[in-house]
Amino acid sequence: MIEGARLFITGANRGLGRAFVQEALARGAARVYAAARDPASLDATLALDPTRVHPVRLDVTQVDACRAAARDCGDVDVLVNNAGVLANYGGFVTRPDQAGIRHEMDVNYYGVLNLCQAFAPVLARNGGGGIVNVLSILAIAATPVVGSYCASKFAALALTRCLAAELAGQGTRVLAAIPATIDTDMAAGYPGPKDAPDFVAKTALEALAAGRAEVHIGPLSNEVYAQFRTDPEGLARERALMLP
């Protein structure tokens, strides 16, 4: 599904986004649109293949910018919604300032919605294609220390499941890619196990090609999901202990 395809990848300037670009190139993508708010931050990504990688300036929270990107990149077959933000630590009640909470929702939920709405008609015209929404096991295992991040990813998971049903008729595959902690700047302070970005990107694109609707990526994501299915109340009690 990736060989010969044209991909649009958000948050492509570093970490997992750059790994998606590299994996797409390795799988024979014809063109990769690498999107970031600051195109100057894309230099290392563009260096992966200056011929096939094309920079795009994009703020995913801006509806008009997402629509413009879809118009300018009208040959896209696969959309990878990777851009995300973790902006708020602590509980809800103890943080009356909602700026960080709203920022997470703007990027992690509305950003995904904006791009899916903009690119769905493009994918339909180009034969269906696919969408990968990068989520998190925290969409399933609510963890109070990053509660608003969990809420934004839970909303994005619900969105992804609905889109999978809604876009099936136009032949568009929609994948919920659900890793745990990834070894990126966002998780720099996390002391636990982390999955390599290239492993996450490879697993997600393989799952899309296989027609999967959801894929749990890495041992920790699978372990937590298994506990959620067998003992959701026990998992909730464990997570509650993680308050700051």
Image (tube, helix red, strand yellow):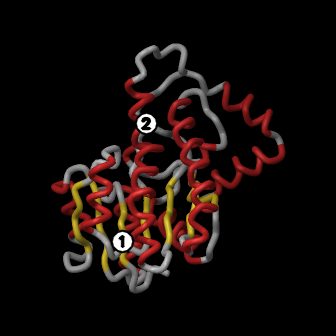
Label 2 neighbourhood size at 10 Å, few (<14), some (14-19), many (20+)?
A: many
- Amino acid type at mark 2: Glu
At 25% from the left and 73% from the top, the residue drawn is: 53
Quarter residue 203 falls in? bottom right
Q: Nearer the viewer, residue 220 or 25?
A: 25
Q: List the residue tagged with mark 2.
A: 104
Q: Is residue 125 above or below residue 88?
A: below
> Residue 220 appears at what percent x and percent y?
64, 51
At 67% from the left and 31% from the top, the residue drawn is: 239
Total numbered badges shown on the rendered structure: 2
Cα–Cα gap, marks 2 and 1: 26 Å
For residue 34, the mark is none
In the rendered image, the quadrant that contains the C terminus is top right
Residue 224 appears left or right of 111: right
Quarter residue 101 falls in? top left
> Residue 138 appears at what percent x and percent y?
59, 42
Q: Secondary structure at mark 1?
A: helix
Q: Nearer the viewer, residue 197 or 131?
A: 131
- Amino acid type at mark 1: Gln
Label 1 neighbourhood size at 10 Å, few (<14), some (14-19), many (20+)?
A: many
> Residue 42 appears at what percent x and percent y?
22, 59
Q: List the residue tagged with mark 1.
A: 22
At 71% from the left and 50% from the top, the residue drawn is: 225
Residue lying at the far right in this picture: please name it: 230
Q: Nearer the viewer, residue 172 or 55?
A: 172
Residue 46 appears left or right of 230: left
Quarter residue 177 falls in? bottom right
Give the mark nearest the N terminus, 2 or 1: 1
Q: Nearer the viewer, mark 2 or mark 1?
A: 2
Disc 2 vs disc 1: Cβ atoms closer than 8 Å? no
Q: Is residue 94 above or below residue 100?
A: above
